[in-house]
Amino acid sequence: MRRSCGVALTDDQAYLLEGRLGGLVSEHGFSSIAELVDASCRLGSEASLSMSVIDALTTHETFFFRDQPFWRALEDVVVPALLRAGRRHLRFWSMACAHGQEPYSLAMLLEERWPAIAASATILATDVSALAIDRAREGRYSVLEVNRGLGAARLLRHFERASRGGFAVRPMIRARVSWDTGNLLDLQAPEALFDVILCRNVLIYFDDVDRAAVLKRITSLTRRDGFVGLGVSETGPGAPLAPGWFRSG
């Protein structure tokens, strides 16, 4: 985990190995967790078995419009500042997006407040887990998942009943997001810099050296007048403008 995606499991998190990898042991025909771990390490992070281990040990905990003060600041401070600066084709990057609630929340908010801006905006969403990205791309969520962070008005406006139960993000909102796998330890230079990069509640799992390196790289991928969004309790580049929000330069 540390070598592949920067997540440093500490000794007191060893219980995660048993709780999250137990199912993979029998699924792949191993006799023990130790045997599974040994095989996945020997195969390398690109192998399907290793990706299954990474996916199982990666925390995908998230929900729609997580941390309301963060989203109020995006609505009241961040986007208005970008528009005052003359930006009209906004570029957003949601890193470590898990199952997609964050980039879909962003697409919904832009559509509600600035529909003309939403139509031309770029929203890139990435995660180290290919399995998580596949699920996010589908845009299907259980009743429990949509009840976490979504009010009735948003649910009616942006979702439709899914044929297999639960709810599906409406095609217009789903089409606003582009998906890809991406590793925070190996961030690729984009074709153009981003106005806003979100990397929330993931760097807390990194050690100090990797955390500093990723923050430096994120800042370099953001426009000089852009913004970096982190978890509301995380430390970023400079003093926060609002809970979780930092200027990129």
Image (tube, helix red, strand yellow):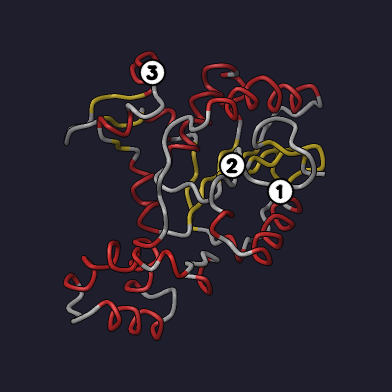
- Earlier residue among tags 2 and 1: 1
Task: Name the residue: 36% across, 51% down.
Answer: 134
Residue 241, horizontal then vertical, whole percent? 75, 32
For disc 2, the neighbor class at 10 Å (few under 14, some 14 to 19, many from 20) is: many
Residue 103, horizontal then vertical, whole percent? 50, 37
Q: Judge by depth and name the residue closer to the eye, 222 or 63.
A: 63
Three-letter residue code for mark 1:
Ala
The quarter of the picture where residue 206 lies is: bottom right
- Earlier residue among tags 2 and 3: 3
Task: Name the residue: 53% across, 26% down.
Answer: 68
Q: Judge by depth and name the residue closer to the eye, 43 or 70.
A: 70
Three-letter residue code for mark 3:
Gly
Which residue is under mark 1?
Answer: 192
How far apart, in angstroms, are the residues tagged by discs 2 and 3? 22 Å
Task: Name the residue: 57% across, 27% down.
Answer: 71
How far apart, in angstroms, are the residues tagged by discs 1 and 3? 35 Å
| Nearest to viewer (mark 2 / mark 3) | 2
Which residue is under mark 3?
Answer: 151
Task: Name the residue: 30% across, 37% down.
Answer: 140
| Nearest to viewer (mark 2 / mark 1) | 2
